[in-house]
Amino acid sequence: MSRSRLTGIALAFLAVSCLAVQSAEAATYGVTPSGSSAVFYVDTTDWADIHYVLNGGGQQNIRMSVTGGRNQYTVTGLSTGNTIDYFFTYWDVSCACARDTAWTRYTHTGTGGGTDAGTGTPDAGTGVDAGPPPNGDAGPVVPLFTSSTALEAATVENTSAALITRVGDRVRDRHMREDQYQAYDHYLKLYFEKRTHWIEIVDTVAKGGSVITVNLYTIYPYDSPDFRAFFRGINTVAEYWHNADFTKVNDYKYTSSVNFNAKEGRAIRNGDRMELEVGVFLQQPVEGRFNYYSTTMLYIVGQGGVVPFEGQGSLRDSFPLPEKAWSGGRTTLHTPFSNEPDNRFLQMPTNLAPVNAQPFVEGRRLHHTNFRDGSHSEPDNPIFSAHANKLGNNYVNVSCISCHKQNGRGLPPSTTNTTLENYVVKVGKVNGGTVTVDPALGFRLQPRAVSGTPEADVRIGNWTTTASGTLPGGTTYSLRKPNYSFLNVTPTNFSARISPQLIGMGLLEAVPESQIAGLADPNDANGDGISGRMQTVKDPETGVTRMGRFGWKAGTARVKHQVAEALNSDMGVTTNVFKTQDCGSSQQGCAGTSTELGDSELDKMTRYIALLGVPARRDHSDATAMQGETVFTNAGCAKCHAPTLTTSQYAAMAEFRGQTIRPYTDLLLHDMGAGLADNLPEGQASGAEWRTPPLWGIGLTVGVSGGEAYLHDGRARSITEAILWHGGEGEAAKQAFVNLSANDRNALLKFINSL
């Protein structure tokens, strides 16, 4: 790459740094070889960033760490002759401005005593990064994914003879467009047994050939499955131009091919829209139903990969969605046809890898399992006896789905003074900023018990109206906040958190740490009032420092850890990640260690949650929604709700690798003011700091959850109320919203609801 050009990530760093580029730098800076490492440094104790390219690869942008009175960052694993092109951005106190150094090339020699670049002088250096910095900046966080990460097989393979796409799938009740039945998006009885498969599209047309072969691979024998291609929809909404039986190769592989586009009356050619569907017939005898349909997919000949699509025209013919509507990249779901609004967060991603089809449904079964009696939350499914009686004595709820209804946002109870069942109430003792365990409760208040008296109870005793008024244009509002009452034990410090929606978590896990560091501005260097900073957490498996991503205060780094923590603290189910139950020093009957849920089951649950498909953006071409998008940016909302992120090329799971996503979050902590603050710090986060929540899927909240509730404790009953609660770093954006014309405000809300 040219050293005179910055990548988009570097520009993100510069955009938040208010740079004053000088011809001469005030600080001493440089690099020192140290064995197989190179220690880069800037002699300043204020913040400094390094931007570097190793051996012509992708650019990294890292917040450096102060060690021994200067900023340092160590690149390890180098060999003699490796090159690193780099420059620094740092804060110069002499001018109260940020400076850029020039791009410089370093060639590794593998010895000490090297010569520094720029204005630097020789310095032996320590070669050791500091621990997590006290303000939660990027520092030496250990990335989740690097060039050494073991990668699962790609879903698209480009060979000399064909472009090959592989995608996992599950059975369906009815055809996609039969919305009158409302029977496409839901899950049928025994969905987790014998009812997944994967499809291989071998496209020789992409390489100058004339045939597309579709192979069907199953985990249970099928009986003469059907292959349908090229949507017709003239006589019925489920009609196709090409209809054929698969030819059986063996009990677990079936094949069919097509070389004619009957829709257009000609040979297939690159760019053709080939919608396809499989008719499934399980070999009998089999428990439960044997005949099913499958997920409808759209393949664009010559391009590789199936794509998210929408229906156009009176027949609702399938056309690729514009990429601005691909909220979750290629995981994005097609625009729904079936009238099942409560099922929008339950789906496999569009680009599901074959290896994940069966783990997804088995993970879903565990997600819906009652760990007290083993029952499934949906009717007609058998007791999962292997997982009965695993519920801890103290718990919040009996299953994951009990808190995360339809995988959507939780709602506060409709009546006051009832035990909270879809909240986590974190507790602790705070002394000088340090949080220690509450001796009577542990770190979570668990209001239910299998036997004996629950450790405590927590309820919303009442709601207090804190403000009300009328916005320009006549919109009235009333803001409220919950007041909590406790029974048995009243914690000194606590934080009540309502259950969030679950979609897109695997994608957020795959965003590189350097990209988030590039959005951070912990010292508000550009003076815009926004000072987002990174949460840092300890990896519970390895002990290394990670970037926090999940939870209301970004207190967890990985989807696996989030799932394991919920199992442990909400249900009292132990795993190899958290082997001890949440227990205070004065509590009885919850000591000792165990592993109740095995690694395989935890992996399935993790994959299920990580892989939940992200719904497509709606109204993507609507004039009012597009006007609202401009208003959203101009009001300053996008400063925290960053519209676009890009996932790592090293993400382990193929579905998440190299995706451009539109989650509308920067994953950073922001001070949201006294109105939203609680009195329990978490990691680097103060009581007033909260992670920017993603906005994707927010417009589907009513359909999924049956009502609206936003912010960490569910106090906001509408998006308008949620915005009006913004304070601190969100104050300016809130005031901009208040001062909008009614037309612009309605446009902004329509845009947000389109996400």
Image (cartoon, rainbow, N blue to C red):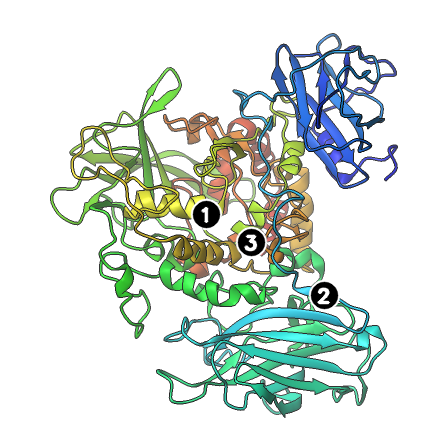
Q: Earlier in the sequence, mark 3 or mark 1?
A: 1
| Residue named by callout 3 | 753
31 relative to 309 in the view: left or right: right
Give the residue type at disc 1.
Lys
- For marks 1 and 2, the one nearer the N-term is 2
* 317 relative position to 458: left or right: right
Residue depicted at x 19% and y 31%: 489
Q: Amino acid at mark 3?
A: Asn
In the image, taking residue 166 as reference, residue 605 lies left or right, namely left
Locate residue 372, reporting x and y percent. 23, 57
Element at badge 3? helix
Q: Quadrant of the C terminus?
A: bottom right
Q: Quadrant of residue 36?
A: top right
Q: In the visual, does 62 lie left or right of 726?
A: right
Quadrant the N terminus occupies: top right
Report, in whole angstroms, how far the alpha carbon at label 3 lies from the one at label 1. Answer: 30 Å
Q: Are marks 2 and 3 in contact (CB under 8 Å)?
A: no
Secondary structure at badge 2 equals strand
Q: Residue at x 64, y 32 (%)?
A: 517
| Disc 3 residue crowd, few under 14, some 14–19, many 20+, Cα 10 Å | many
Residue 309 position in % (x across, y down):
65, 68
Question: Which residue in the structure is indicated by mark 2?
Answer: 157
Q: How far apart are the two marked residues, 1 and 2, measured between alpha carbons? A: 28 Å
Q: Residue 560 has which mark?
A: 1
Quarter occupied by residue 525: top right
